[in-house]
Image (cartoon, rainbow, N blue to C red):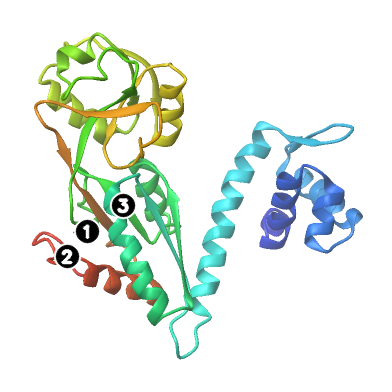
Amino acid sequence: MHRLEASLELRVLRYFLAVVEERNISHAAESMFVSQPTISRQLRDLEEELGVTLFQRGSRTIALTEAGEYLAAQARQILALSDKTAANIRQSRQITGSVLIGSAEAPMVETLGQAIHRLNETAPGIHVNIYSADASEVHTRINSGVFDFGVVMEPTDTSDYHFLRLPGKTTWGLLTRTDSSLAQNTSISAADLQQQRLITSRQHGSIGTLSDWFGSSDIALDIVATYNLLYNASMLTTAGVGSTICLDGIINTTGTDLTFIPLSPRLESQASLVWPKSHPLSPAAHALLDAIRESVPQIDQNSTPA
């Protein structure tokens, strides 16, 4: 037990991730300012103590095994949480620290931008990082303590979270090429969508929202791909894979071969900022929340205090 715990100490995980990033032990050793034998020995000990092979060693580069991929993903979360915790407890009289927000792609994130700008002026020692993620990942990482806040599209389950509805709404529609048969339409109906190859969001909340809009579970759509980041879906649309059902205000179509056409009947969505009820916010996260509240003209009556 003691040997396994020792193998997963933070220093060894940092060595491991350095090799993962560099794909070369010599380069990893240089980046970590240690000798190559030191890292090689630590990796051999790590594999021996875990009882797995983490790397497929080649003549020039190093590739990860399935076990190595899993450990790399977990190590990134462990080290991110460790670094954030250390930054938040190393405080002087002025509030400092790191705040991590997991966010859906939404134009309402502009409110966060305004708050972060205000915070930069009043508390320059606070660093805010935004990580693009879908609702499922946001909830998972908030619950594990990695994310301080999440921005999720509604509807969403807020029973375990404090939440603040962000101002503004965005509209669902079809992102399609300008040479599409629908490009000249002023709106898109359910019947129009049945004639198209479609790229749709894989988020459960979005799927439910669109199912309600169709009003029937019997609607047959030709879905050729799904996405969790709209930019990637827009590249598929540009390449002619299919048209993308998405929210407006995320992809700037100016000067591109794409156009956005709203759905009819109109379908709108809002976004909420969520944070956990289960554990307290750090001083840095509290400071950001105060700045966000100052940026919101009127706090929604259903929001709750930290």
Judging from the image, what secondary structure is the residue with disc 3 in? strand
Q: Nearer the viewer, mark 3 or mark 1?
A: 3
Label whose residue precedes the other's in the sequence (2 or 3): 3
Q: Nearer the viewer, mark 2 or mark 3?
A: 3
Q: Which label belongs to residue 65?
A: none
Label 1 sits on residue = 163
| Mark 2–mark 1 distance (CA, rounded to whole Å) | 6 Å
The answer to which of 195 and 180 lies nearer the viewer is 180
Label whose residue precedes the other's in the sequence (2 or 1): 1
Is residue 217 among what the camera can see?
no
Label 3 sits on residue = 151
The answer to which of 257 and 13 lies nearer the viewer is 257
- For residue 23, side relative to residue 302 (left or right): right
* Image marks 2 and 1: residues in contact by CB distance under 8 Å: yes
**Badge 3, how many Cα within 10 Å: few under 14, some, many 20+?**
many
Label whose residue precedes the other's in the sequence (3 or 1): 3
Up-down relation of residue 57 to residue 160 (above or below): above
